Image (tube, rainbow, N blue to C red):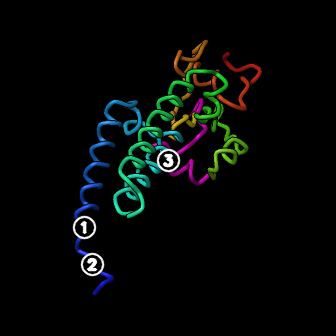
């Protein structure tokens, strides 16, 4: 029966540390960057996993004090805030965020870009079918966004230039140069 409850007297301190760590995490995350839970990038995911590990370990480990767990937790929240700010720097931003990728260019699959993103043709086709798109030929672009979503831009007749947000995505896309003869 000791594997269920080793010592009853340990349950109080475990519950107390769990409550304190939970409260510390809520306050720290509330004061920290809002994006931690709202938008998941690599820095958000790493921070969330590390916070979960620290909160869990601090709550149940006899050798882990609340103060040590709280210091580690608050340090991670501060580092996350710093990484969020560094994303605005052009060089550091490339370290923390994936770049936009052009997966379809004027109806043609760009398989090298799919491969770089870890996607197969069928992965892309499934996403397009779920959006009610059953052929890539009438697509001007499919952009694989920094956070993993797809932007589908249909081909438009007599359009001299790209809409501003599409152009911004193309300008920031990694591994893409406008085709000769295509709109700039």
Image quarter where the C terminus lies is top right
Whether pointer 1 and pointer 3 mark residues with C-beta atoms closer than 8 Å, the reply is no
- Which segment is the magenta one? 121-141
Task: Quadrant for residue 142, please give it.
Answer: top right
In the rendered structure, which disc, 1 or 3, sits on the residue that comes first in sequence?
1
Q: Give the residue pinned by disc 3.
A: 127
Q: Classify residue 40 as left or right of residue 118.
A: left
Crowd band around label 1 with a 10 angstrom C-alpha radius: few (<14), some (14–19), many (20+):
few
Residue most extreme to the right? 180
In magenta stretch: residue 108? no
Image quarter where the N terminus lies is bottom left
Which numbered marker is on residue 11? 1
Position of 101 relative to 11 (above/below): above
Q: Give the residue pinned by disc 2.
A: 5
Crowd band around label 3 with a 10 angstrom C-alpha radius: few (<14), some (14–19), many (20+):
few
Task: Quadrant for residue 36, please give it.
Answer: top left
Q: Nearer the viewer, residue 38 or 2?
A: 2
Query: Gap between marks 2 and 3, in whole Å?
Result: 49 Å
In the rendered structure, which disc, 2 or 3, sits on the residue that comes first in sequence?
2
Secondary structure at numbered mark 1: helix
Secondary structure at numbered mark 3: helix
In the rendered structure, which disc, 1 or 2, sits on the residue that comes first in sequence?
2
Residue depth check, mark 1 versus mark 3: number of the one nearer the observer: 1
Q: Classify residue 55 as left or right of residue 135.
A: left
């Amino acid at each position: 029966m000791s594997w269920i409850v080793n010592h009853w007297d340990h349950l109080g301190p475990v519950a107390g540390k769990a409550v304190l760590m939970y409260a510390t995490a809520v306050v720290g995350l509330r004061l920290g960057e809002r994006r931690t839970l709202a938008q998941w990038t690599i820095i958000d995911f790493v921070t969330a996993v590390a916070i979960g590990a620290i909160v869990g370990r601090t709550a149940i480990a006899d050798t882990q004090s609340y103060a040590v767990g709280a210091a580690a937790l608050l340090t991670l929240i501060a580092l996350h805030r710093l990484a969020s700010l560094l994303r605005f720097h052009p060089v550091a931003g490339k370290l923390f965020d994936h770049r936009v990728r052009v997966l379809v260019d004027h109806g043609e699959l760009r398989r090298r870009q799919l491969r770089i993103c870890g996607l197969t043709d069928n992965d892309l086709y499934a996403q397009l079918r779920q959006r009610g798109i059953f052929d890539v030929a009438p697509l001007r672009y499919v952009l694989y966004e920094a956070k993993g979503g797809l932007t589908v831009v249909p081909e438009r007749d007599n359009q001299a230039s790209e809409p501003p947000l599409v152009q911004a995505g193309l300008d920031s896309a990694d591994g893409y140069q406008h085709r000769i003869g295509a709109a700039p």
